[in-house]
Each structure stands twice: as C-alpha cells, then as structure tokens.
Amino acid sequence: MNLINCFRKFTFNPKEGIDNPAMSSVADSETVMAPAFRLCVLRREESERFGFYLRVEKGCQGHVVRRVAPFGVAERSGVRDGDRLLEVNESFVDDMGHTEVSRRINISGTQLCLLVLDGTAYEQAVAQGHDLKALTRAQRGQEWSPPRLCFISKDSSSCLGLRILPVEGKTHIFGEKGKFSVSPASGGPAEKAGVRKGDRLVWLDGATVSELSHSAISKMVKKCGDHMTVLVIDSKSEQTYASRRMPILPSMAVGHNLLYRPRKQHLIQGPEGYGFLLRLEQTTSKHPVHVLREVDPGSPAELAGIKDGELLLEVNEELIENMEHNDVVDRIRQGGQQVTITTISVQGQDFFTRLGLSPLLFCEDTSTAEPTESVALQDTTDHDSDSQCAPVEESAQPRLCVLDKGPNGYGFHLGCVLTKPGTFISQVAAEGPGEKAGLLKGDVVMEVNGASVEEEYLENVIMMIKEAGGSLSLLVVGSEGYEKMLQRRTPSSAEQTSNDGQLFN
C-alpha cells in the first residue's frame, strides 16, 4: 500500500489558524468502521479438492471455515481457519441453511468466488448491528447486474441475429486476443434470447473468449449449428468485476431463454406409491445414471409432470450422482410419505455437459411444499437389518461402541434431519460390525473417536468416520434417552458410558 497518499499534506495558514485536516476529533476516531471483506477466488483442477470444511458451530454465528488444508487451493487463495462465509459466487449465504450453502459450493464446478470475513471482525460486525447483506451488496456498486447465460436459436433464415465486435482499443481484428462486445439485430433471435446492444461477450459455448482471437470466434459461430449459448454482461457491470479483480463465471449467471432446465418437484405418496420405478442405467459414454421409468398414469409423479426416461439429480436437495443405486432408493424411502426430487431430461443433461456446467445452477423449482423431515444415509453396506430398534430400557444411558471395519464397511447407515445438525443410526446391517459392537437403529451419535458431533452436520460426521481408518469409536444413546438428557441438560462424554461398549485392541 502507498501510505504517502493516505493523508493530505498539512500547510499552516496564519489567517485560518491551526486546523490540520489530517487530524481527527475524538468523535471521529470512534466512528464505526465497515467490516473488511476478503474476496477469495479458488481455482482447482478436476482431480483436486478446494481444501476446506464448512461448519455451523455451537455458540458461533454464521458458516465457519475450518480445517483449511495446508498449501491447498483454499489456503493459496487466502481462505483462513475461522473465517465466516458471506457470499458464494455473488450470492449472499449468511442467512441460508448449511445444507443449501454446501450444495451451492458443490455445484459450482472448478472455480469458486468466496466473500469471507475474519471471525473476530464478523462477531464485531454482528454485535454492532451491521447489515452484512446490504454492505456486501454495496461493494458491487449500484450499477451492478449479474451476467446472463443466453441460449440463441437460429430463425427461419438460419440467422442468429448477432454481431461480435472487438472492443476499441482492446484488440485488433487481425488475430489478437482481447475483449469483445455484441450487437444483436433488432427483433432477432439474439435479442429475444436476452442479449443487449453493447453487452460484453465473456463466454461462448463453454469457451472463455478472452483467450480467443476474433477470427477464432468467427469460426466457432459458423460451426455452432442451429443454436449457440453465450455468457454476456453489460459494460458497467463488467467494470465492477474488473475493479474487484473478480472473474465473471457462468455459475453467477441468470439463465435467459434456456431450452432445458432441471425441475424440482415435491411428491406426496399416493395409495400405490409415487408412481415410478427408479433404475440404474448407462449413458452412451458408459456413465451410470439413475433413471425414472414406467411413470403410472394419474400417479403423483405424472401429475407433477415427470416423464419416462428423466434423470434423477437430487433427492431432498442432496446430490445423488455418485451414489450407489440402493442408497438412492433408501433416501427416497426414508422421506416417509413425501419426497422432493430434482430431475432433467437426457437432452438437457447432454446440453449442460457440453457446456461444462452443472444443470443444478439453473434449476426450476416447481415444488409446492417442503418436506418436514428427510434422512440422508451413509453408504456402508448393502444388507440392512430393519428390525434393530433401540429398546427404551436399554438406551437411556450413553454407550461406547467400538467397531472394526469389515469388508463391506462398518455395517450401518447414518442419517440426519434435513437442514439440522445432529446424526443418528438409521439402519444396522445384520451380523455386521455395527450390530456386533452394539449399535441399534435409532441411536443418536454423540461422539466420533472422542470428538463431539452433536452440533455437526451429516457431511462432516461422514468425513470424520472415513478418516477413522480401520477402527471406529462411537458414543451413542437411544433417541428417548437423548431427549431426556437434553431436558436435563446433562453433559456426556465417553467417560460416562454404560458397560455396553468394550475396547478391542
């Protein structure tokens, strides 16, 4: 920082007396300063992780950054342990639920823009009554508008109705890379798709145009076929991004005229169920997908607009792309009499795949209600014992259960209530390590390897279990016993367990 320009030079004027403008009164020195936000731009390779955990901690407000990996993507980008997360890709998240914030990060792709605030500064800002949402919005400027992702289809004359021009002073037509503006024909396909005169072209069919020459862009337009997808932004908004040194990403965009969008639907089970079958199939590229088949006429699924062959993307706002088929089925069943699912057509999935984007960035919410409870299960084994329920008389005291990992995992499924911290044992495999160690269906998990997890969300608990290696220690208690403990506010730890648990070396 150049400190010379931080203060105005004082020149004594005898006629005016001593009035140094560089000095401030006591009242001025007590002026409350605005919080110092930090913008962190994270870029990772496909095989990399962002390298941090996001938690909601007891006694702490906000979404807390923890366990930042040394020399990882997050640390290299300026993220620090204890930071509070305020924005994800220009969206304010401080007032969102933890599950939704995690979801936004997971679907962002390989680039992520986080606005964070130091933990101490965050607590001071909250104590002083700062409107953090208004302050974060103000730093973008009043003339800011989000970028637009526009799908342009050729008209009957095979015309896109769009001219792409180099920005004057930034590039030359003869092969130099740089900035480009667009000029849509009045009433043409591009204008109807949301493109405006003078917009800056940021991205074209998945390619960042700042890395392309004008001739290369012209060739892409000629080869685009019947349609083209562009990311554009008005020139004033572009300047706000440039002044903040922030990239303009498709994950920040508002969709315009998109031919395909995933749909979120809330289903309430009918007398014959939801009215569809879920199958595990493969795409032409041998990629496994979960497909909705045999949609029954008049069923809840058909009434919600679900078509045969649609792909399932989420169950109760949980990503299921990398799950085993049985686990997806379990998640639907564990919702009870209702479930919220997100689906997309095969053509829609192919469209977003070609663009290198997650379709969930542009989801259409057609659900009419939210589920009152949802359970997410950990994949540990394929064989479940539904009869293992915790008897009240045996579950009043905490129990320490020590498990040795078997060939199919630890032999239990872990569940949670949607958007709330805390986890419980939802299923226990017969003859598995969990059953042998004394785990019972319905047990509330209080500690994992001696660390309290009562205020942890499901994803954090799963990660702790995965990091345990071949041996796992769980402090659990039956659900009714846990409710009684909460009423008494009785502290619990591994030292206060009953004799049900035994340590095996």
Image (cartoon, rainbow, N blue to C red):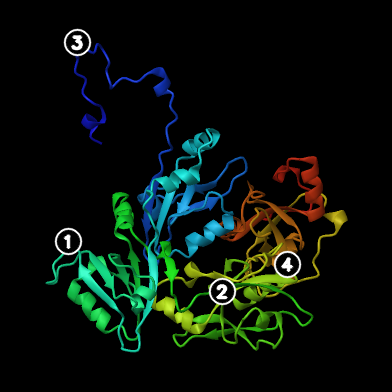
Give the numbered dot on residue 428: 4
**SS for callout 3:** loop
Which residue is at 68% across, 62% downward?
415
Numbered disc total: 4
Q: Which mark's residue is nearer the viewer, 3 or 1?
A: 3
Q: Quarter holding the N terminus?
A: top left
- Which numbered dot is residue 170? 1
User: Which residue is at the front of the view, 190 or 396?
Assistant: 190
Residue sticking out furthest to the left: 174
Q: Where is residue 473 in the image (x, y as percent from the top left)?
A: 66, 54
Question: Is residue 505 at least partly visible in the picture?
Answer: no
Q: Please report contact status of discs 1 and 2: CB closer than 8 Å, yes or no.
A: no
Q: Give, as a three-letter code, the residue at label 1.
A: Lys
Dot 1, crowdedness within 10 Å: few (<14), some or many (≥20)?
A: few
Mark 2 or mark 4: name the one nearer the start of the chain.
2
**Disc nearest the viewer among 2 and 3:** 3
Q: On residue 14, which mark appears? A: 3
Q: Which amino acid does label 3 sit on?
A: Pro
Name the residue carrying label 2.
263
Residue 52 screen position, x and y as percent? 47, 53
Q: Quarter-wise, where is residue 496 in the image? A: top right
Lower position in the chain sequence, tag 1 or tag 2: 1
